[in-house]
Amino acid sequence: MKNEAAYGSQNHSSPLEVAQFQRVGFYFYGSTKESEIFLVGDFNFWQAGTHRLVETDVLGGYSIVTEMPRGRHRYKFVVDGNWTQDSGNKCAEPDGFGGLNSVVTVSPLHACGNAAV
């Protein structure tokens, strides 16, 4: 996952609203070219279909960059209908169904792009 500043986004109408969101990158590796992969989580009401990952390389890499509000978010990938934890993210918590949700925290960035301490 990679955080990027979301300054100047056309999706927000004021500097205060822009500061509340950041661009976050999610990456999934190990699928076939025919795979359909979605990002789902509490930020999109766990709805597959709204955040589709696109193929980024011939070795099975997929990615998406999306704007997310600041805070702590739980998420998973849906790969060809199968819900799976992000194996590249060690931060996880029980999902209530015997598995794990991955967790990402979106924090404010300084103008230079470094996370605030």
Image (tube, rainbow, N blue to C red):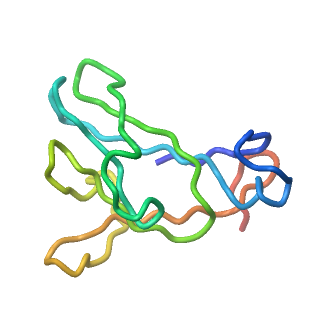
- In the image, what residue occupies the spot 26% across and 40% down? 37
* Residue 45, horizontal then vertical, whole percent: 40, 64
- Between 79 and 89, the residue placed more toward the observer is 79
**Residue found farthest to the right:** 15
Rendering coords of residue 19 (x, y %):
77, 57
- When asked about the image quadrant of residue 115, the answer is bottom right
- Residue at position x 83%, y 60% in the image: 16
Horizontal arrangement in the rendering, residue 70 relative to residue 96 (left or right): right
Of residues 7 and 81, the one drawn nearer to the viewer in this rendering? 81
Q: Residue at x 25, y 59 (%)?
A: 85
How many callouts does the rendering have? 0
Q: Is residue 103 left or right of residue 15?
A: left
Residue 89: image x %, image y %? 35, 57
Question: Horizontal and vertical percent for residue 67?
Answer: 58, 49
Q: Quadrant of residue 94?
A: bottom left
Up/down of 69 relative to 29, above or below: below
**Horizontally, is 20 left or right of 46 in the view?**
right
Residue placed furthest toward the top: 58
Residue 1 to residue 42: above or below: above
The quarter of the picture where residue 49 lies is: top left
Q: Which image quadrant: the C terminus?
A: bottom right
